[in-house]
Amino acid sequence: MNQTGPIPTVSIYGIPFSKLTMKETVDVLREAVLTKQPHQVITANPIMVMAALENPAMMKVMQSAEMIVPDGTGVVWAANYCGEPVAERVPGFELLHELLRVGENYRWGVYLLGSTPEVIQETAVRLQEQYPAIRIVGYRDGYFGPAEDEQVVASIREVSPDLLFVARGADTQEPWIHKYKDTLQVPVTMGVGGSFDVISGRTKRAPKVFQKLRLEWFYRLLREPSRAGRMLALPKFAIKVMRDKENVTKVR
Ligand code: UDP
């Protein structure tokens, strides 16, 4: 299918989740690059939905994104449970790779922003090896404060990438992209969280068995127990959706 017109979405507590398949998502984003239309892509999960419900600024960021894809299994479940299913889960990690694969045909320029200096350098090397026709036009670590924003944004603008991947903490990356999207004028900008840590080999993705059972979150919890507090958002989200059932998709 060729996606024309607005992206079909399902609203989950006012957050419009794309109903496109992975392939359709990539098609839309390829078009965004070819027509140079800035798109902020947010790969969202229940933790982010819950955060947005508690934080109006985060809600605004999410509602202003050009595309929100259902990354978390919990979101896919919720849409299905409420009778407005999404096509499939669109994991951010896979979307990043799909975009690089497609981008090779066009020799897209890519900027990598975030994580530590060692991780980002190793990520750049590995992605260049894996996608030789991609042009890595720049990279830098994600440990800078607001005082350096202007300089960071200027150095990205200077090399005008087609894709910008931002890996900073979940609370930081989406508002940062939102704030600078207009100045950056990059066709596709996407927050990728811990992806560079995985690509660089610093952390391992969950073993296949956890992936199959859709328990990647559980594997991460085992490795980083400090995540437990935040993960309470998952059962809270599930209970809330079951309680609100008919109304979940009505909020706009
Ligand atoms: N990170 C960063 N700058 C920061 C905080 C985090 O670049 O100020 C990077 C960190 O190195 C990691 C990624 O952001 O590569 C995701 O970090 P973390 O897993 O702590 O964030 P979460 O997704 O848990 O919020």
Image (tube, rainbow, N blue to C red):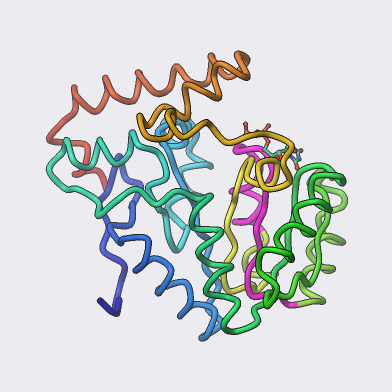
Question: Residue 61: percent from the left, percent from the top?
Answer: 51, 50
Q: Nearer the viewer, residue 27 or 128?
A: 128
Foreground pick, 94 / 126: 126
Q: Is residue 12 left or right of residue 202?
A: left
Q: Residue 132 versus residue 120: which sits nearer the camera? A: 132
Residue under the image location 73 percent in, 46 percent down? 200
Is 167 colored magenta in this rendering? yes
82, above or below 84, in the image? above
Which residue is pictured at 70% across the width and 41% down the height? Answer: 197
Q: Is residue 100 highlighted in magenta? A: no
Range of magenta residues: 160-179
View quadrant of ligand 1: top right
**Residue closer to the observer: 122 or 87:** 122
The quadrant where residue 184 appears:
bottom right
The quadrant of the picture occupied by the N terminus is bottom left
Q: Relative to 222, is 115 on the left or the right?
A: right
